[in-house]
Amino acid sequence: MHRKVTKAVFPIAGMGTRFLPATKATPKEILTLVDRPLIQYAVDEARAAGITEFIFVTSRGKGALEDYFDRAPELEASLKAKGKTDLLKILQATNMESGQIASVRQSEALGLGHAVWCARNLIGDEPFAVILPDDVIAADKPCLQQMIEAYAETGGNMVAAMEVPADKTSSYGVLDVPASISPVMPVQGMVEKPAPGTAPSNLAVIGRYILSPQVLRNLDAHQKGAGGEIQLTDAIEKEIRSAGNVYGYRFDGRRFDCGSKAGYLQATIAFGLARDELREELQDFLHEMMGMRQAAE
Ligand code: UTP
């Protein structure tokens, strides 16, 4: 029986430069898909997987994220007075219990590995999950829940993996795994952003991890990797070599890269179309736009 995973780290200290100027004064994780900020999707996914302690690794200018999960007493009172109980329920569902969210600062954006390392004192000596809120996954069973169930069998470390086209592997951490169709794959190696043509497979790691505290200890060395950043991939790769206990998990679902403009727009359309109250109007609009484009070409 492996120790239950109850803590999740949300590294949200990046600068979000691909969304400038929007992210000049607004954290990327507050950007909204339909009517919910990206961070809400991430926190909901963690909750569904049984996470009870939420650790935000933040940086300057991210205060809106902490306020977002706090109570909004004036707004609640106003909605109550107006009898807007549906809206009140939606609002109250975003409140987190006192003490459930803890924040630590990453004072300099030295990389994802460094961001996770910043949470070491709050994680302690137990396995933990990492969720990157800009990877949004639409799935019947939330991705982290799928992984936690698989992890109950394997223990060790687990990374979410998905197939990407060969010409895109150089944007990801890529897994070296035996050819298999099984969702759980023992990982033999892992390379961050391999040069074109050198990737060991087309299975890319995306932003969901279950990690052992040993990975944190590997990060103590502050070793710089690809792009001059302290990479989480390198600390996991060390575990593959020393303990051989890293698994790739091919999740069931569709991932949207909401850290990129194209991925964010696709997610907005997909999540809009998934809403009963928006579907028809949005579909009609998309047809009209496509028709206009075709006519113009
Ligand atoms: P990204 O590579 O998307 O970087 O980080 P970014 O700064 O958020 O965005 P761009 O590339 O400038 O547009 C992936 C995840 O790792 C976190 C980010 O907040 C994001 O969730 N991160 C990255 C940190 O928390 N600290 C870092 O030093 C780097």
Image (cartoon, helix red, strand yellow):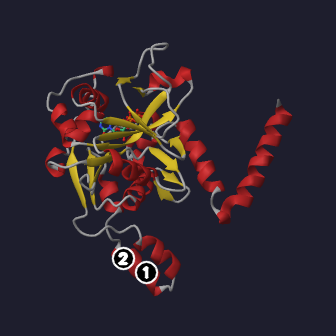
Residue at the image position 35 percent from the left and 48 percent from the top: 153
**Residue 271: % across, % down:** 59, 53
Do the numbered discs 2 and 1 sit on residues whose CB atoms are within 8 Å?
yes
Hey, which residue is sitting farthest right in the picture?
295
Q: Nearer the viewer, residue 107 or 173?
A: 173
On the image, the x and y values in percent for residue 227 come to: 33, 21
Q: How many marks?
A: 2
Q: Secondary structure at mark 2?
A: helix
Q: Nearer the viewer, residue 130 or 32?
A: 130
**Left or right placement of residue 34 versus residue 222 in this view:** right
The amino acid type, in three-letter code, at marker 1 is Ser
Residue 186 relative to residue 204: left or right = left
> Residue drawn 46% across and 77% down?
88
Q: Is residue 105 left or right of residue 38?
A: left
Residue 74 badge? 2
Q: Tell me the residue at 46%/30% (across/down).
A: 204
Tell me: residue 199, above or below residue 4: above
Q: Is residue 12 visible?
A: no
Q: Ligand 1 quadrant?
A: top left
Mark 1: secondary structure: helix
Quarter of the figure that contains the C terminus: top right
- Which numbered marker is on residue 78? 1
| Real-space CA distance between mark 2 and mark 1, rounded to the nearest whole angstrom | 6 Å
Which mark, by number, is residue 110? none
Give the percent coordinates (x, y) of residue 27.
38, 47
Can the viewer see residue 234?
Answer: yes
Please name the amino acid that badge 2 sits on. Answer: Glu
